Image (cartoon, rainbow, N blue to C red):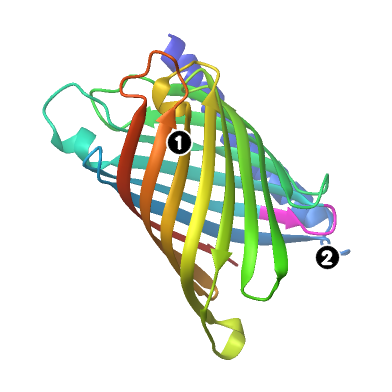
């Protein structure tokens, strides 16, 4: 009965969001304030210490008011990792799920800050995991760049804080990145190929006190990026980390990681 009610509520959210976005798009047709948009973000990583490849794909499609900073959209969210699927033990190395729902984002509050609310349903993609059902994701993301007086040397400050009902957990992450780009090749139509040393300090915290969510890391290596309508970046990283949870074992660790990210918006 509980799952049935959850699915009914999930369908109601999708239907409501569809008619709401259509109503807004048509109501503001004359002013041209609203427009349709679609975007895609993905990341995939190989974590040497865990011996697994993990990936995340987040497409979106909806309407946007750039003047006021509103976005209303539909979004599937797919998360997977190879070792949880392939290994016969009951050990879970990363979540394997599909989220389907509708979202509302607001970017008109502070420049570089995105407030986000998503409502929908998550589905387990592996029989080891039992977290599916009605799901919410509410919180914020921030991104800022700071130049150091040189065109090819800057800092990136990224943070996110979300409550995710699937995990019954609040998650926070802060990253302070220093990027130097000695190699930069500019092409037509704003396309840029660049690469150089990359340093990232990452701090992570959660409210449920899982040791794998509470850590401090120094990541060092190389970032190669191609900026075009479809932007991609490859990171080759060494990692030195320490878990901040007192009973974590081991508390200190090292790792090697390959991270590939991409984004596209029309």
Snapshot quadrant of residue 247: top left
Question: Mark 1 highlights which residue?
Answer: 99
Q: Residue at x 60, y 87 (%)?
A: 189
Tell me if residue 210 can be seen. Answer: yes
Query: Alpha-carbon neighbours of circle 2 within 10 Å: few (<14), some, or many (≥20)?
Result: few
The image quadrant where one finds the N terminus is top left
Say whether residue 48 is left or right of residue 69.
Answer: left
Whether residues under marks 2 and 1 lie with C-beta atoms below 8 angstroms apart, the answer is: no
Instruction: Return the x and y of residue 260 as percentages of the image width and height.
Output: 39, 59
Give the tally of numbered discs. 2
Question: Mark 2 highlights which residue?
Answer: 32
Q: Nearer the viewer, residue 56 or 16?
A: 56
Say whether residue 92 is left or right of residue 205.
Answer: left
Q: Nearer the viewer, residue 160 or 77?
A: 160
Tell me if residue 95 can be seen. Answer: no
Q: Which residues are magenta?
A: 63-68
The answer to whether 233 is drawn above or below residue 128 in the figure is: below
* 166 magenta-colored: no
Q: Residue at x 25, y 40 (%)?
A: 49
Instruction: Return the x and y of residue 187 as percentages of the image width and height.
Output: 54, 89
* 64 magenta-colored: yes
Query: Alpha-carbon neighbours of circle 1 within 10 Å: few (<14), some, or many (≥20)?
Result: many
Instruction: Return the x and y of residue 46 as percentages of the image width and height.
Output: 29, 49
Q: CA distance from mark 2 to mark 1?
A: 31 Å
Q: Nearer the viewer, residue 97 or 100?
A: 97
The mark found on residue 88 in the picture is none
Callout 2: SS: loop
């Amino acid at each position: 009965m509980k799952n049935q009610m959850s699915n009914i509520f999930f369908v109601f959210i999708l239907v409501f969001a569809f008619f709401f976005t259509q109503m807004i798009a048509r109501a503001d047709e004359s002013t041209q304030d609203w427009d349709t948009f679609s975007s895609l973000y993905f990341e995939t990583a190989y974590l040497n210490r865990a011996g697994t490849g993990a990936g995340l794909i987040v497409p979106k499609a909806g309407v946007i008011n750039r003047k006021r900073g509103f976005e209303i959209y539909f979004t599937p969210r797919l998360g997977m990792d190879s070792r949880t699927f392939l290994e016969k033990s009951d050990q879970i190395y990363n979540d394997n799920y599909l989220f389907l729902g509708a979202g509302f984002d607001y970017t008109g509050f502070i420049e570089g800050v995105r407030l986000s609310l998503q409502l929908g349903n998550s589905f387990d993609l592996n029989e080891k995991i039992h977290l599916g059902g009605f799901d919410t994701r509410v919180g914020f993301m921030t991104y800022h760049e700071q130049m150091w007086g040189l065109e090819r040397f800057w800092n990136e400050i990224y943070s996110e804080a979300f409550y995710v009902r699937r995990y019954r957990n609040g998650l926070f992450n802060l990253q302070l990145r220093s990027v130097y780009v000695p190699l930069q090749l500019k092409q037509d139509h704003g396309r840029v190929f660049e690469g150089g040393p990359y340093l990232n300090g990452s701090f992570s915290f959660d409210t449920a006190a899982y040791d794998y969510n509470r850590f401090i890391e120094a990541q060092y290596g190389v970032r190669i990026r191609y900026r075009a309508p479809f932007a991609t970046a490859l990171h080759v990283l060494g990692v030195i980390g320490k878990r901040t949870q007192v009973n974590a074992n081991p508390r200190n660790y090292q790792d090697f990681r390959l991270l590939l990210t991409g984004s596209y918006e029309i």
